[in-house]
């Protein structure tokens, strides 16, 4: 089961990076000065980071619900886990859309 958890987290991180437009090559080195950016750019970056963090947390809760669903014994408990899984998957779709929009706003505000 631990392999699934790591794959889920890695998948969520990869999704967040793709939607956020970040790659390891874009990380500035410490000896390079950071480019001057405006307040709107900083706020847009914070929104993207916040949304990426929420996306990772949601992926963790989905993995937890799926693991719990695999081991449930009562019909009512299994139904609750099924509902939680459906709701979380629906929220992930909306969150991915919101993250893409925030990333576009960030790119426009930061001149990318």
Image (tube, rainbow, N blue to C red):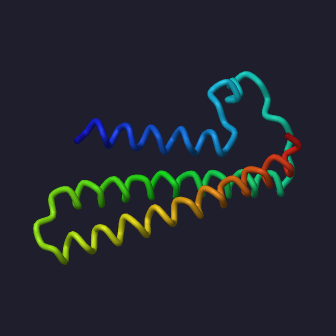
> In the depicted view, which residue is nearer to us: 111 or 42?
111
Left or right placement of residue 20 versus residue 7 in this view: right
Quadrant for the N terminus, please: top left
Seen in the picture, residue 75 relative to 104 is either above or below; the reply is below
Q: Residue furthest left?
A: 73
Give the residue at x 68% y 58%. 47
Left or right placement of residue 35 versus residue 52 in this view: right
Quadrant for the C terminus, please: top right
Give the residue at x 21% y 69%. 78
Give the residue at x 53% y 53%. 53
Instruction: Return the x and y of residue 101 as percentages of the image width and height.
Output: 73, 57
Instruction: Return the x and y of residue 97 as percentages of the image width and height.
Output: 65, 58
Could you tell me how many numbered marks the image carries? Answer: 0
Q: Residue furthest bottom?
A: 76
Seen in the picture, residue 29 relative to 35 is either above or below; the reply is above
Residue 76, quarter of picture: bottom left
Residue 32, quarter of picture: top right
Give the residue at x 41% y 43%. 9
Instruction: Return the x and y of residue 25 as percentages of the image width and height.
Output: 67, 24
Seen in the picture, residue 10 relative to 53 is either above or below; the reply is above
Left or right placement of residue 101 versus residue 4 in this view: right
């Amino acid at each position: 089961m631990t392999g699934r958890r790591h794959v889920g987290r890695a998948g969520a991180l990869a999704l967040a990076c793709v939607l956020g437009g970040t790659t390891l090559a874009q990380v500035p080195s410490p000896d390079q000065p950071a480019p001057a950016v405006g307040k709107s750019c900083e706020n847009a970056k914070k929104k993207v980071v916040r949304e990426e963090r929420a996306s990772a947390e949601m992926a963790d809760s989905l993995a937890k619900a799926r693991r719990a669903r695999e081991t449930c014994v009562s019909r009512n408990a299994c139904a609750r886990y099924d509902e939680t899984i459906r709701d979380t998957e629906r929220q992930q779709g909306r969150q991915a859309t919101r993250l893409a929009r925030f990333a576009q706003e960030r790119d426009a505000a930061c001149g990318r």
